[in-house]
Amino acid sequence: MTRLANPTPLFLDRRGTLLDAGQIYVGVAGSDPELSPIAVFWDKERTIEAAQPLRTSGGVIVNGRSPAFVYTAAADYSMRVRDADSNEVSYVPSSVDAAGDDLYQPKDSDLTAIAALATTEFGRQLLTLANAAALRDATGIPNGLPVAGGTMTGNIGRQGAGSHLYHVNSAYTSGRVFGPEYTTDPTTQPGDIWFKPNG
């Protein structure tokens, strides 16, 4: 599927309407394009030179009455646009700035290397996951225990003061582990563990 787009840029007058009978001058970058023009052409091969100023109709550059593309060998150029009354509409000293190259991320060797990796597609798929739950499913990370409790296996590493409930065995509902901040034995049921403070 191909999206249709306007193939030619639109030139506007000072009121923001399509520029009719406009005059466009193209020149040396950083200079006045009317005083320092450069060669522009109607074809990519640069065999048919276009006279300046270029003219507009309905906001586009025209060759005669037909909308046309214009080409130049220069990597950078200045441009001045005037309306039908020769009033200046705009002037840009550099087409590089005007074209908005800074709107695109500059080429980067690290990004180029990442794009060439065989794992790039996998990484892109991870970046398109909708939320944390989808990421856990994709990576096999188990859900955390709910606030009201839950079931899990394996060793538990806990931090912080206070008692922590744990399951002892079928003979006891649960047990508690008390940290060393207790100076007397606080245990009240079988299975409790109490760590005495040093000293």
Image: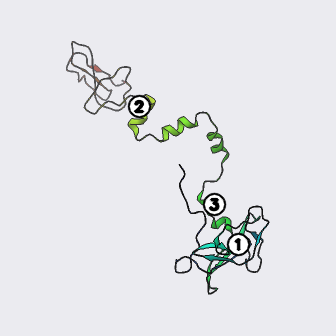
Q: Secondary structure at mark 2?
A: helix
**Residue named by callout 3:** 101
Q: CA distance from mark 1 to mark 2?
A: 55 Å
> For this view, does 154 lie left or right of residue 85?
left
Coordinates of residue 168 in the picture (x, y in percent): 27, 16
> For this view, does 27 lie left or right of residue 90?
right
**Residue named by callout 1:** 78
Q: Secondary structure at mark 3?
A: helix
Q: Secondary structure at mark 1?
A: strand
Mark 1 and mark 3 in contact (Cβ < 8 Å)?
A: no
Coordinates of residue 184 in the picture (x, y in percent): 25, 24
Residue at horizontal 77%, vertical 61%? 45
**Residue named by callout 2:** 137
- Taking depth in this image into account, of 138 and 80 the one nearest to the observer is 80
Amino acid type, residue under disc 1 in the picture: Ser
Q: Residues within 10 Å of mark 3 (few under 14, many from 20)?
A: few
* Whether residue 33 is situated above or below residue 95 in the rendered picture: below
Dot 1 or dot 2, earlier in sequence: 1
Amino acid type, residue under disc 2 in the picture: Asp
**View extreme (bottom): residue:** 85
